Image: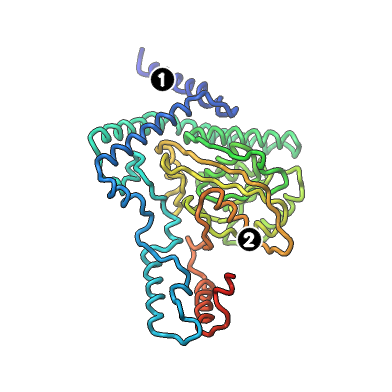
Amino acid sequence: MDSGELAGKIVYTWLTLVLGFILLPSAFGLSLGISELYMKILVKTLEWATLRIEKGVSKESVLKSSASVGIIQRDESPMEKGLSGLRGRDFELSDVFYFSKKGLEAIVEDEVTQRFSSEELVSWNLLTRTNVNFQYISPKLTMVWVLGVIVRYCVLLPLRVTLAFIGISFLVIGTTLVGQLPESSLRNRLSELVHLTCCRICVRALSGTIHYHNKQYRPQKGGICVANHTSPIDVLILTTDGCYAMVGQVHGGLMGIIQRAMVKACPHVWFERSEMKDRHLVTKRLREHIADKKKLPILIFPEGTCINNTSVMMFKKGSFEIGGTIYPVAIKYNPQFGDAFWNSSKYNMVSYLLRMMTSWAIVCDVWYMPPMTREEGEDAVQFANRVKSAIAIQGGLTELPWDGGLKRAKVKDTFKEEQQKNYSKMIVGNGSLNSELD
């Protein structure tokens, strides 16, 4: 047997295993139990690694290094507590110290910027990229880490790349072919089948383990699904359980290829965030879409950018102005098995996917929540905040009032003016923050 025949047999065997044990079951939403067995072994291994680290390092130092999620210990009290007794008297020079302290805290570690970097881990997950706070490594732990590197890069990575290539190729080819058919119910069914099947294959390429809760509240046709946003794979996670018409920013590269192919078979809406005319067109398209109760639910991420899955930031009001029923969805990833957050300023899409494919797995929980509608006398901003609060509570996420657009833009003057206004009220005595809060 020459080398060519041997290579051919290896490739044939490899593709047979991929097709028979992974591709076909995932395409039909089935599982042979391989993923469950892998996750059980992985959980036991990480638990053992955590015990080894705690055994080698004193308990106090482990808690100190792993429990702190911030660089500084800040006082979270509001302005009027920090300047207690200020109301009803004139400005004093000592007031400057309060604002200087708050300014230095913001320079060292503000509560916005840290949401655009990876979440800190409580215990090491045997990935070199996350061992900043966990320097102690015993010989046994080193051997397990080396074995893990071999498994992730020599076994899992080739398998995952193969599945991802097949899934993305089928998606591009399938949507392009379906897009050639005339508008009909058959075309819509085929489009849903292609999206659903290919997304399931791509999730399997990430060793995705997804737990769906409250399926009775799944978004219905003619509605709007809104969710917190961590990564482009949020779309895969949700589409594995049902199809959506998506709304999102235009991308280039690999993402652009996928977007252009998908829109041929399904009425997705891609727009350029910086173009005002695009935003008006999107609003018009959304109103037309929800008016037809036979169309797929619309999937929108109102934050407008990826957050590191520790918080929920300001929801843009545009999605809540068009009317219709809102179906909130909370997505929470488990960072212990792999960091799902996409830092787009640091990694392009291909680099990000490779990081995902060299992680242990993607594990997340998805909570479907009862539908919500705009109440009488409630404006779009209040409705958006109410939906955001519900998602934050359900997903165990921190609710922040800040605009995710601060990731790319300067702070608006209105934020500064609001603080100045509150301070002036306390000085002049024209009402206090206490009365507003009450």
Q: Residue at x 69, y 37 (%)?
A: 180
What secondary structure is marked by label 1?
helix
From this view, report whether residue 237 is shown above or below residue 67: above
Residue type (three-letter) at the residue carrying disc 2: Lys
Q: Nearer the viewer, mark 1 or mark 2?
A: 2
Q: Nearer the viewer, residue 323 or 191?
A: 323
Would you identify the image quadrant in which residue 275 lies?
Answer: bottom right
The circle on residue 10 is 1
| The furthest residue to the left | 139
- The local crowd at label 1, few if under 14, some if 14 to 19, many if 20 or more residues have their Cα within 10 Å, is few
Q: Is residue 277 visible?
A: no
In three-dimensional space, the C-alpha distance between marks 1 and 2, rounded to whole angstroms, equals: 55 Å
Would you identify the image quadrant in which residue 374 lies?
Answer: bottom right
What secondary structure is marked by label 2?
helix
Q: Residue at x 57, y 36 (%)?
A: 199
Q: Residue at x 68, y 45 (%)?
A: 297
From this view, report whether residue 325 is shown above or below residue 33: below
Residue 234 in the image, given as x and y percentages of width and height: 54, 44
- The local crowd at label 2, few if under 14, some if 14 to 19, many if 20 or more residues have their Cα within 10 Å, is some
Residue type (three-letter) at the residue carrying disc 1: Ile
Q: Is residue 73 visible?
A: yes
Residue 210 in the image, given as x and y percentages of width and height: 53, 37
First of labels 1, 2 by sequence position: 1
Picture mark count:
2
Residue assigned mark 2: 317
